[in-house]
Amino acid sequence: MIGLIGAMEMEISGLVACMEQTQTESVSGILFYIGTIEGMPCVVAKCGAGKVNAAICAEAMILKYAPEAVINLGVAGGVGAEVKIGDAVIADAVVQHDLDTTALGEERGFISGLDTVYLKPDSLLNRALQEAAETVYPARVHVGVIATGDQFIAGGDALHAIAQAFHAQACEMEGGSIGHVCAMNQVPFAVFRAISDQADHHADLDFPQFAREASARSSRLICTFLKNWKNA
C-alpha cells in the first residue's frame, strides 16, 4: 500500500476520482480513502494546510494503515532561479525553514533527535517519480531542496532568506513535517510539488489562477507513477 497526502481538496480530488473499490474512514478527524489506483493499493488523505496538520495525518496514516511508503504531493511556490510556474520539483531533501534554534548554537532548521537539517527522501521512490514526471512535465522537472514552513511565502525578505539559507527550489507548508514523521517511523517517503506560483509578490494572484491546473497535473503524475510502480 502507498500512502498519498495532499493539503487541499484540489490536490487529492483527481486521485480519489481514479480510485476503485473505495472505502472511507475517519481517523483523528481526517478522512482517509482506501482503495486501488491503477491496480495499486493506496490510502489517500487531505491533511489540511500547515506542519501540525500534516504531521497528524502522516502519523495517523502510518499507525493505522502501515503503508510501505508515503508520498506528499501538491502545489508549491517556486524559489529556485530556474523554477517556473508549471514546472515540477521532486525533493532530494526537505527542510523546515521556520525551525530555528540558532540562539542555542544550532543550525537553522536543525531537527533535535534526528540531529540533522536535511531529511532525505527514498532514492527508489524519487527515481520512479522522475521517470513518471518526464511524461507529464517534459524538460520541466527539477530535483532539489523543498523547504517547509508555516507561512505562505509571497516574496520579500522571507523568500530571499529561504533561498540563501537552504538553496531551496520550492517552498510549501507540509512536506518537511511529513518527512519528519516518516523518518521517525522509518517509513520511506517522497515529496513532489507542482509549481503554482513563484513565491514572489505576485504569489497571492498567481496561486488561485494556477493551483487547480497544477494540482490536476500532479494527480496525472502520481497515477503514472503508481502504474509503473505496480509493474516494476
Image (cartoon, grey):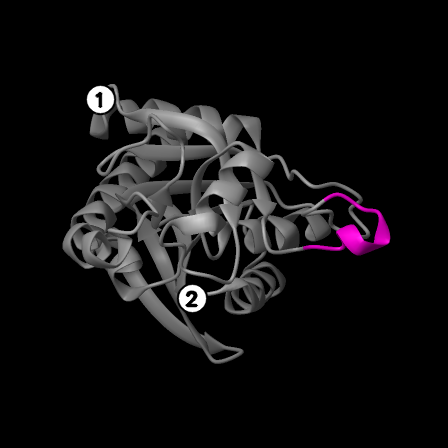
Circles 2 and 1 in contact, beta carbons < 8 Å:
no
Q: Which residue is mark 1?
A: 138
Left or right: 74 in relation to 220: right
Q: Residues within 10 Å of mark 2 (few under 14, many from 20)?
A: some
Question: The magenta stretch spans which residues?
Answer: 100-107
Q: Amino acid at mark 2?
A: Ala
* Tag of residue 30: none
**Measured along the vertical axis of the image, is residue 154 above or below residue 91?**
below
Q: Which x, y percent locates residue 165?
A: 59, 38
Horizontal side of 86 relative to 97 (left or right) equals left
Instruction: Determine the residue positioned at 28% across, 23% down.
Output: 134
Q: CA distance from mark 2 to mark 1?
A: 29 Å
Q: Is residue 224 left or right of residue 99?
A: left
User: Is there any visible trace of residue 96 in the rendered image?
Assistant: yes
Determine crowd level at label 1: few under 14, some 14-19, many 20+ residues with C-alpha closer than 10 A: few
| Type of secondary structure dominating the magenta stretch | loop
Corner quadrant of residue 21: bottom left
Q: Label 1 amino acid?
A: Pro
Q: Earlier in the sequence, mark 2 or mark 1?
A: 2
What residue do we see at 33% from left, 64% from top?
8
Pinpoint residue 128: horizontal percent, then vertical percent: 42, 27
Q: Residue at x 28, y 41 (%)?
A: 223
> Considering the numbered disc 2 on the image, is that residue within a helix, a strand or a loop?
loop
Q: What residue sits 41% from the left and 50% below the top?
A: 156
Q: Position of residue 84 (x, y in %)?
A: 26, 33
Q: Check disc 2 and report the residue beneath it.
A: 49
12 relative to 68, above or below: below
Quadrant of the rendering where the C terminus is positioned: top left
Q: Secondary structure at mark 1?
A: loop
